[in-house]
Image (spheres, rainbow, N blue to C red):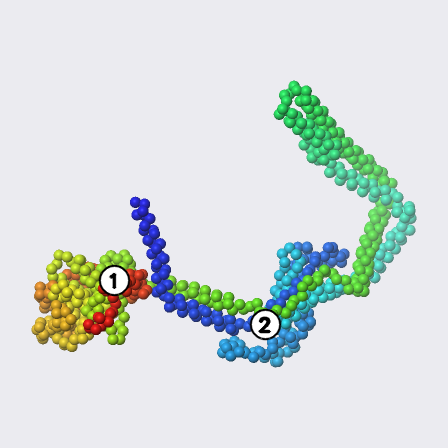
Amino acid sequence: MASNHMNPQNNDKAFDLKDALTLLKKHWMIILSMTILASLFSVYLAIKSKPVYQSSSSLLIERPNRMASLEQIYGMMGMVWEFYPNQIHLLKSVPVAERVVERIGVNNFIPKEKQLNWYEKILPGNGVQNYSSMSDDELFAMAVSNVRSTMTISQAKGSGVFQISFDDYDPYLATLKANSLAESYIEEVIESGINAKQRTGESISKQLPELEKKVALSEQNLQAFQKKHKIILPDGGGDLAVQQLGQLSIRIADLRRDKLNLESIYRRIQSVLTQPDKLARVPALLEKSEVIKQKSNFVKSQARVSELGLVYGPKHPRMKQALESRRLAKKEYYSALKVSADLIVADYEAITKEIVHGQIGVTSIRGEISSNNELTFEYDALKRDYDYNKQIYSAFLKQSKETDAVKTASVQTINARVLNKATVPTSPYKPNKKIMLIIGLIVGLMLGLAMAFLLEHFDNTFKSSDEIESKLGLPVIGMLPEVEEKENEFSPALQFVQTPKSSFSESIRTLRTGVLLSMPDLEHKSILVTSTVPSEGKTTIAMNLAHSLSHLGETILIEADLRRPMVKENMGGINKKGLSSLISGESIFAESISVDKRSKKLHILSSGMIPPNPLELLSSDKFELLLEKLKKKYKFVIIDCAPVMAVSDALVLSQKVDAVLFVIKHESTPSQLVESAVTRLKRASAKIVGITLNRLKTNKARYGRYYKYEGSYYGHYGYHRHSDKDKKRA
């Protein structure tokens, strides 16, 4: 059972692969055409594209180790991580591009007139632009735009090396731009740094006299205040009481800061002072050198006890010695913790006491100078103003001297140098015509395949017997290959007679067998041959089937398509009398029928003159009576009828025959139309014995593999397409 389940899957896979190959074989012309068109387009682009040359130079830019004080004040440089991105933007900036143009010269950017080749002249878009009418500013702007648009800057990962590349139709111009950009960048950086320092220096120089006046004025005010209020500064240090008060205040502030830092540690120590094991959890104590030392000894002794405990018992001398050592180490460790904790507590309490004494001293000093308290504050304000003005003046004076140094010496503010100069390229790097052609071939092939799959997807015709049986629910009892109508060859309607050894004739025999097997109990058989729409080959099948059945007994072929009769035309007959004249009584039966010269057992009742009312004629009792007589006289009655969707003749005749043979042209009639035609026949209770798939394209369809053995398989049994013997016999 397992094998039965596996086989369908394998068949599906093989079928899918064959479907793909069949699709390629079927639409090979579309795929080839798209491939050729895409290739031609790629060749056109390759011919039209001008060769582009690329020249590259490398520039090393090192980040400054430190920032100058001027940069610290005015923030000229960005953060460290923004340094290299800023340099890339500077390399691509307009000022640097303008320097490049000035170095090279605007005339070098004007394209030289080139003599076009013959194949370039026929291609559109190869005209020469006139630059003589442009002004100098326009030419300069064009050159700057050319520099910026053809530039490529890339930074080597993890380094300050920058690759500067330029693309241009002129290899010499590309080289000039690559070398000039690096040099122009260095000049721009140096000059901008010097200009910035000079501008800052000029601004500082303008402010220095004003700052100097402010310093002198604040110093005069301070001295005048001292003389007026007789404030004597010992050793040039100011009033002693004021100095003592300031120093004591600073000392108290420092002590309070130290007390605040120790307060949390002090409170924690106080809470666990009598518990040595919890003292060991205070981080501030564990940082003490003596505690670290004793803790290390304790850990070693504990490790020693653990190590000996694996070998000796607790009463062993060595074990007892180790335990005693651990006890002593633990005691010393806890003692060190206690001593350190006591020191911290003592420091905290000492600071607290010193703060109290300092506050008492401040109160005492303030009492001494309470009389001139206002003078003290005024003096302090004048002193602070003097100190501030003096500091600002000193800073500006320092920057002014640095600016003077920059003016006298060209100092490079950034470390940058050219590592490798650009060289003139000897060959273009694009376009790669081979790659373009390969891409064109691939794109064309993909487009062709896409179009083939789309055509196949939207093709709603019948392409296989499986589709017919699944959609219509009717068996396919015959598949006839397509017969090409060439000059000096036989008509498809006479293939069975003229080429009895061909594969087409063998397909007719297979169809004949299918028809006979579908009606095994009937001695006399009447068969209606119809289709969905005209030009599906129903007349051809009716005539060949009639010739085939005539080999088995008396057969008559009735041309009931009274609107577009084709039997008489294919047989070459000129009899104007036929079915219409026989039913109307204008002729007798002997005058209306003709005997086929190739097969004496085949009689043909052609349409005769086309009547004005074919449907009424076929619906008449006279036609029904005639058909009953013919069924008794002939073993096989074949009726060629009009298509189902064209007129209602087939629906009427399907009630009067034993079987209906429905013809479908391969890959021609839409499946929806065929389904409608079959539905109409079924509603009329027609006895459809099967479907014939006609004009099978053996070179495209999946069934082509069954017919490719015509020269070997059929030839082995005496069947072939068209032999000289058949033509001679005909």
Q: Amino acid at mark 1?
A: His
Residue labelled with disc 1 = 716
Q: Are marks 1 and 2 in contact (CB under 8 Å)?
A: no
Q: Is 618 on the left or on the right of 368, as rendered?
A: left
Residue labelled with disc 2 = 169
N-term-proximal mark, 1 vs 2: 2
Q: Amino acid at mark 2?
A: Tyr
Q: Position of residue 551 (x, y in %)?
A: 15, 65
How many residues crowd mark 1 within 10 Å: few (<14), some (14–19), many (20+)? few
Q: Residue at x 48, y 66 (%)?
A: 438
Q: Residue at x 72, y 66 (%)?
A: 187
Q: Position of residue 501 (x, y in %)?
A: 22, 66
Q: Is 400 on the left or on the right of 638, as rendered?
A: right
Which residue is nearer to you in this view: 468 or 49? 49
Q: Is the N terminus in the top left, top right, bottom left or bottom right quadrant?
A: top left
Which residue is nearer to you in this view: 495 or 713? 713
Q: Is 111 on the left or on the right of 234, as rendered?
A: left
Which residue is nearer to you in this view: 436 or 227? 436
